[in-house]
């Protein structure tokens, strides 16, 4: 729009400005999602006319409300009173600075009773002006022709794929995954108003579930669009101050129908550091109940098994380093799960390539699962325990054979980087060594992030140590620099295996890093404030503060539950796509 109106008489009300819009500009004054601002003789004031999406008055609606009006506005005071709730809102703005802030920060901050939305200025001039409005949920910035907000200088990483399960075995169980914006960014020096298009710091993906009948007895639910595996790509934009920015990414959402899986029992080797070991994988309420992600995954599978009559939906987690069990209640029954892993506290890539590692083949200088099998095998290739001396490994004896679960894996996961990070070359080397011995075994790569956030104002109950990342972290222990370390590790994985060729070779990036909650994911405890004894203080009376060994590195059970769900859904994805090799 390159034409500007002269002064507009505002005393007659909205009819005069409406005619001006309809005339010179040939626009519909009743068009949806448009804000017109007009200047009268007092140039320091503006009058605004906002048509909210939820309260639009169109020409057709006027005619319906007043059939003989000929499309004109209601004339009598009574008619105006009847239509007052739906009629055009007008506000006065005292100066251009207010208008600029109004446009920059969002319309709801400056008006009353208007649904949420955000302004995107096309142009702004002294005198008369017109400004367009578009809800963030509608259309792309490119399609609207609106300007993009300049994003603050920072680095970013994005998840290539997320996984969900359309749970037709039990509709009330989870079928969604949530991404957290904080983990995607690095290098921000202060808090900015960066959000997803939904106006939030998290973004959800749901498995498709559709009700096809109004009947309460037989609602006719269709899960996953009737497909065993459903996949679609979604483009997600980031917004700054409510305005879409030039930052956007594509993520593949892969949803699996639960009843289509459960026929194969994968044998999973989880390789990792203290996160896989389970350090800190507890809650403030029960610090003795370890819920490390691979054990929590077994719990989810056990619930599937219970829903399917006690058969199928099993998995065997292999290892000799750690063995864990936990009991849980589900639908008035108590179940127990037990699993193993190869998680070692304090270990890095270099440790796995040293004499301390059960996988290190010193003669070849390589990581070797076969070396591990020769030393610690306790099971045949169907997961049945061997008798001592009948094919068991040379490190196995009668006292440890019942505590170690080792056989050839059909799935391998690698979760390293918390101790010194990881480079693209280190991840490539480890994957290459596994591929040399097992050319087709699926490999999942993942890292966690440190607990924290770039948006402390959104976490009022978290202490300062849990609520801001920076690169020096002098007053926050390990919080700040750990985020940069893990961000770089995630970026290294994406650099090494972020293309389609890697998945064609059965190498997948699991989005553990992106689904981890932020400030609330640290190992922590609840500390009462001095006024906690007063009930009227409510949730403000307690503060969560970090507590434990490297508590922002060793994330809690909430983080591990999200890790577990991604592992659980990915295993089903592998099965329904016949990607787990059969022995």
Image (spheres, rainbow, N blue to C red):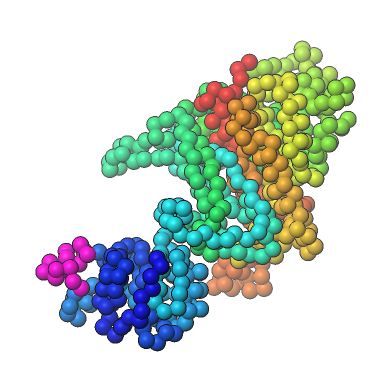
265 above or below 166? Answer: above
Name the outermost residue toward the left: 68
View extreme (front): residue? 2
Q: Is residue 286 visible?
A: no
- Name the image quarter holding the N terminus: bottom left
Which one is in front, 263 or 538? Answer: 263
163 falls in the magenta region: no
Q: In the rendering, at what x and y percent does residue 328 appear?
A: 59, 40
Q: Quadrant of residue 335?
A: top right
Q: Residue 552: give x, y in percent of width and height.
A: 72, 53
Q: Quadrant of the C terminus?
A: top right
Q: Which residues are magenta?
A: 59-73
Residue 572 pos. (x, y %): 54, 30
Examine the rendered structure and indicate whether residue 330 appears above or below residue 371: below
- Which residue occupies 87% across, 32% down? 354
Q: Residue furthest top?
A: 390
Above or below 513: residue 569: above
Visible residue check, residue 126: yes
Compare residues 579 and 168 and report the one nearer the observer. Answer: 579
Q: Position of residue 297 (x, y in %)?
A: 60, 36
Q: Is residue 301 left or right of residue 436?
A: left
* Location of residue 349 by image quarter: top right
Q: Is residue 564 above or below residue 226?
A: below
> Is residue 283 or residue 327 the one in the foreground?
283
Query: Residue drawn at (74%, 15%), measured in percent from left and top?
Result: 387
363 sits to left or right of 57: right
Q: Residue at x 17, y 78 (%)?
A: 75
Chief secondary structure of the magenta portion? helix
What residue do we see at 52% from left, 59% from top?
148
């Amino acid at each position: 729009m390159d034409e500007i109106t002269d002064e507009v008489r505002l005393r007659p009300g909205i009819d005069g400005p409406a005619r001006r819009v309809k005339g010179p500009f040939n626009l519909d004054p009743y068009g949806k999602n448009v804000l017109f601002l007009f200047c009268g003789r007092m140039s320091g004031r503006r009058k605004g006319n906002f048509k909210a999406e939820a309260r639009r008055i169109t020409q057709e609606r006027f005619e319906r409300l007043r059939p003989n009006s000929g499309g004109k506005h209601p004339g009598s005071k009574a008619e105006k009173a009847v239509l007052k709730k739906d009629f055009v809102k007008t506000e006065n703005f005292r100066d251009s600075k207010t208008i600029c802030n109004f446009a920059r920060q969002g319309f709801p901050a400056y008006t009353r009773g208007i649904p949420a939305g955000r302004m995107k200025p096309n142009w702004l001039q002294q005198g008369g002006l017109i400004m367009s409005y578009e809800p963030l949920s509608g259309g792309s910035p490119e399609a609207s022709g609106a300007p993009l907000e300049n994003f603050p200088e920072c680095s970013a990483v994005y998840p290539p794929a997320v996984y969900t399960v359309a749970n037709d075995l039990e509709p009330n169980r989870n079928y969604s995954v949530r991404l957290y914006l904080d983990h995607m960014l690095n290098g921000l020096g202060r808090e900015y108003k960066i959000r997803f298009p939904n106006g939030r710091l998290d973004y959800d993906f749901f498995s498709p579930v559709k009700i096809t009948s109004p009947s309460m007895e037989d609602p006719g639910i269709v899960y996953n669009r009737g497909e065993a595996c459903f996949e679609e790509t979604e483009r997600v934009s980031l917004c700054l101050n409510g305005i879409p920015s030039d930052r956007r990414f594509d993520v593949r959402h892969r949803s699996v129908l639960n009843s289509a899986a459960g026929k194969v029992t994968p044998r999973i080797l989880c390789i990792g550091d203290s996160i896989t070991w389970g350090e800190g994988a507890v809650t403030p309420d029960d610090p003795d109940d370890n819920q490390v992600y691979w054990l929590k995954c077994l719990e989810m599978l056990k619930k599937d098994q219970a829903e399917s009559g006690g058969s199928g939906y099993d998995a065997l987690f292999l290892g000799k380093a750690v063995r864990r069990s936990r009991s849980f209640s589900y639908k008035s029954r108590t179940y127990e799960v037990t699993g193993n892993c190869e998680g070692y506290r304090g270990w890095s890539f270099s440790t796995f390539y040293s004499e301390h590692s059960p996988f290190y083949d010193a003669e070849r200088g390589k990581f070797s699962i076969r070396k591990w099998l020769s030393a610690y095998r306790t099971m045949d290739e169907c997961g049945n325990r061997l008798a001592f001396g009948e094919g068991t490994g040379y490190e196995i004896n009668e006292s440890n054979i019942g505590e170690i679960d080792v056989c050839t894996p059909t799935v391998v996961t690698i979760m390293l980087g918390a101790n010194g990070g990881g480079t693209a070359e280190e991840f490539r080397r480890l994957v290459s060594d596994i591929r040399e011995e097992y050319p087709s075994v699926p490999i999942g790569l993942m890292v966690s992030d440190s607990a924290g956030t770039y948006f402390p104002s959104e976490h009022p109950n978290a202490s300062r140590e849990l609520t801001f990342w920076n690169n020096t972290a002098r007053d926050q222990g390990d919080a700040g620099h750990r985020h940069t370390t893990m961000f770089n590790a995630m970026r290294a994985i994406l650099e090494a295996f972020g293309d389609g060729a890697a998945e064609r070779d059965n190498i997948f990036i699991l989005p553990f890093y992106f689904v981890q909650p932020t400030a609330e994911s640290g190992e922590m405890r609840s500390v009462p404030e001095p006024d906690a004894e007063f009930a009227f203080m409510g949730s403000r009376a307690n503060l969560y503060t970090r507590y434990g060994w490297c508590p922002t590195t060793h994330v809690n059970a909430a983080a591990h539950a999200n890790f577990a769900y991604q592992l659980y859904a990915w295993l089903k994805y592998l099965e329904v796509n016949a990607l787990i090799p059969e022995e």
